[in-house]
Image (cartoon, coloured by chain):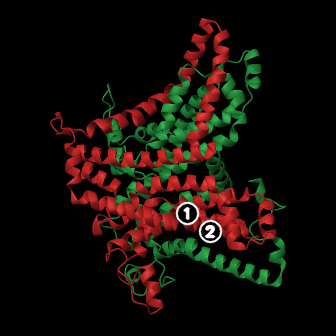
Chain colours: A red, B green
């Protein structure tokens, strides 16, 4: 949505900018441009250093091998071949894919339904908003350590303590299976991140005109049909935007596996593997190649979203 | 946000339905279930953390865990504060957050103002290049960004372990520039033209006319800036390797090895205090800014 609005804004700006420029004298135009670029200078330098240049450098480095004598060699696609023969590569993609999938079930559906229910409440609304947003404000590493403790394999952890209290068998949360470990990370991730999403959905829900619900009810639509035929279509734009943001966000998961599971149980994510290639093995070529791959996937998602939403906008 | 105030527009369930006896029973059941559920899910973990930090090293590994500490050991908090040097970590993070805020306010506001009102040639191309970076997450290009920060092009200065490594990259926030530019676009050009007739230069116009009108959006951008620095982990993990300059997230990660469990929990609890206090003070602005920012995006 952002970029679509931006393209419209840019087109409008171009038209507007064309007008005064024709009339103004050369000197005045020069001065205006000089002032304009002076105002842009700080931001442009920061973007160039920390966004544009690294971007290009990542692509270049993915085709190179660097050793610490400072010599670099072009190796073509060898970095890509190398990482694809690494079992960790496939494991990292599997973990990241599984994380994204679970996050869609929990991190995407749970906040939406929470927001729908909260929007129906007539009392203590600020209590719910405050509580759901509280974890968002915790330093993520502190929260992750807290949850690692909750997931303790022995009965001293909160979750096993509760199971113990209910006389249920305890669970090796992070240590037993890969799927369960990833699920545990997603639960934590949902807990710490859902506040923001819930508030965004709440704002979107408040924008739905009451008459539509009224009309649906008169036509005999029950609760579920009203959700499906009114609430969902009315919040379609924000739902699809959040879907895209969520997929792109969860594909970059790093803190959760890094802090909570470490490298155990194969829960290394793609970004974590990039980090390991770069900073544990000093293999910048492999790290850059993997970075480029992830980048292609993410840009693919974002581009596909933009394409779909601009098509929907034209209809 | 106006919709949050009375009179409420009709939502999914009509008021008539809620006023019926059945509706009322269901409503209050759901309401109280949610009250308890939210407290259990979002508040109880915080209680568990704060009380865990008070337990002795034997009690914290007891099975099953105790809900209320048998003996209160405030010494854990003292140990966490002293040994982990939490005061320094928090102070460092405050400095990084405020510095990033200042740099973003100066450079991003100036850039957005140039894009919106001064409109130099190729300004739109530059804006487009900045917005394109929204597609490229910083985590993915962390390595080349790190290498650049380690040795800046041409001058070969290293920003590692200096505040600049946090401050300068934070300026490269296309989202902030986009939000600010959108807001500046809504300021009527006549207003600025009037200022120009009165002899105000671009800087004077920005300072005396644009900025006072833009207070709401500046608030939003400021909160994004502060919270962004406070929550970031991967980037400070790379560039702040010296113990003395680390941020809260990196410092906690480092001290987690070789520290007793109960002291670590106490440290986590202390580390959460500043942001939660910040949140309680600014909750209205934070929540309004969050929704305003995303709806406009």
Identify the residue shown where x is 67% and y is 28%. B207
Depicted A282 relative to depicted A26: above or below: below
Q: Residues within 10 Å of mark 2 (few under 14, many from 20)?
A: some
| Chain letter belonging to callout 1 | A
For the residues labelled 2 and 1, the Cα–Cα distance comes to 10 Å
Respond whether the residues carrying marks 2 and 1 are from the same subunit: yes
Q: For the residue labelled by badge 1, is the local secondary structure a helix, a strand or a loop?
A: helix
- Report x, y in % for residue A19: 67, 16
Q: Quadrant of residue B80?
A: bottom left
Is residue B167 rendered to the left or right of residue B23? left
Identify the element where label 2 is drawn: helix
The chain ID associated with circle 2 is: A
Q: Quadrant of residue B43?
A: bottom right
Instruction: Name the disc covering residue A194, or none.
Output: 1
How many callouts does the rendering have? Answer: 2
Image point 55% across, 41% down: which residue? Answer: B175
- State the image coordinates of residue A117 (x, y, percent, origin top left): 67, 70
Task: Give x and y (percent) for residue A302.
Answer: 48, 47
Between A194 and A313, the residue placed more toward the observer is A313
Residue A226 tag number: none
Dot in front, 2 or 1:
2
Q: Along the polypeptide, which appears first: circle 2 or circle 1?
A: 2
- The one nearer the camera, B126 or B224, is B126
Q: Residue at x 37, y 77 (%)?
A: A173
* Label 2 with label 1: CB-CB less than 8 Å: yes
Decide if residue B245 is in sight here.
no
Image quadrant holding the C terminus of chain B, namely top right
Residue pointed to by mark 2: A114
| Residue located farthest toward the bottom when viewing the structure as drawn | A167
Residue A70: x %, y % from top left: 18, 34
Rendered position, B215 above or below B77: above
């Amino acid at each position: 949505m952002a970029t679509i609005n931006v393209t419209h804004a840019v087109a409008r700006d171009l038209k507007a900018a064309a007008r005064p420029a024709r009339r103004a004298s050369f000197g005045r135009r020069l001065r205006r441009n000089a002032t304009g670029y002076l105002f842009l200078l700080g931001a442009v330098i920061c973007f160039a250093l920390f966004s544009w240049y690294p971007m290009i450098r990542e692509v270049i480095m993915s085709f190179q091998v660097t050793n610490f004598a400072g010599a670099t060699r072009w190796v073509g696609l060898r970095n890509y071949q190398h990482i694809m023969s690494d079992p960790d590569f496939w494991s990292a993609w599997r973990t990241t894919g599984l994380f994204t999938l679970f996050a869609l079930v929990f991190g995407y559906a749970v906040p939406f339904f929470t927001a729908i229910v909260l929007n129906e409440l007539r009392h203590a609304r600020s209590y719910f908003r405050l509580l759901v947003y509280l974890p968002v404000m915790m330093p993520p590493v502190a929260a992750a350590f807290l949850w690692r403790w909750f997931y303790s394999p022995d009965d001293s952890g909160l979750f096993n303590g509760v199971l113990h209290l209910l006389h249920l068998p305890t669970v090796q949360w992070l240590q037993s299976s890969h799927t369960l470990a990833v699920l545990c990370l997603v639960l934590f991730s949902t807990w710490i991140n859902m506040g923001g999403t819930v508030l965004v959905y709440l704002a979107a829900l408040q924008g739905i005109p009451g008459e539509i619900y009224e009309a649906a009810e008169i036509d005999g639509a029950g609760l579920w049909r009203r959700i499906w035929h009114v609430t969902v279509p009315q919040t379609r734009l924000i739902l699809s935007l959040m879907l895209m943001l969520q997929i792109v966000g969860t594909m970059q998961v790093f803190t959760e596996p890094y802090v909570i599971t470490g490298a155990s149980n194969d829960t290394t994510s793609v970004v974590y593997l990039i980090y390991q290639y770069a900073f544990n093995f000093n293999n910048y070529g492999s790290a850059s190649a993997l970075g480029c791959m992830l980048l292609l996937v993410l840009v693919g998602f974002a581009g596909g979203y933009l394409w779909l939403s601009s098509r929907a906008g034209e209809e | 946000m106006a919709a949050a105030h009375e009179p409420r527009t009709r939502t999914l369930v009509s008021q008539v339905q809620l006023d019926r006896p059945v509706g009322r029973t269901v409503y209050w059941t759901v309401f109280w279930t949610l009250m308890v559920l939210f407290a259990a899910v979002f508040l109880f973990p915080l209680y568990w953390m704060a009380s865990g930090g008070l337990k002795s090293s034997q009690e914290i590994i007891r099975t099953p865990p105790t809900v209320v500490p048998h003996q209160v050991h405030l010494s854990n908090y003292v140990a966490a504060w002293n040994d982990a040097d939490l005061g320094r970590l928090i102070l460092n993070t405050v400095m990084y957050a405020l510095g990033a805020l200042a740099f973003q306010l100066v450079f991003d506001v100036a850039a957005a103002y140039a894009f919106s009102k001064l409109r130099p040639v190729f300004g739109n191309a530059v804006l487009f290049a900045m917005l394109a970076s929204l597609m490229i997450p910083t985590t993915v290009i962390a390595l080349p960004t790190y290498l650049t920060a380690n040795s800046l092009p041409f001058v070969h200065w290293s920003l590692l372990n200096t505040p600049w490594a946090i401050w300068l990259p934070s300026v490269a926030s296309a989202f902030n520039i986009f939000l600010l530019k959108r807001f500046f676009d809504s300021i009527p050009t006549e207003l600025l033209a009037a200022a120009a007739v009165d002899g105000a230069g671009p800087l004077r116009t920005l300072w005396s006319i644009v900025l006072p009108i833009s207070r709401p959006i500046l608030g939003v951008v400021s909160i994004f800036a502060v919270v962004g620095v406070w929550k970031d982990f991967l980037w400070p993990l790379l560039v702040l390797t010296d113990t003395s300059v680390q941020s809260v997230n990196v410092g906690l990660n480092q001290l987690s090895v070789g520290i007793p469990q109960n002291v670590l929990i106490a440290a986590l609890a202390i580390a959460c205090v500043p942001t939660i206090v910040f949140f309680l003070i600014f909750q209205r602005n934070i929540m309004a800014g969050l929704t305003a920012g995303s709806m406009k995006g």
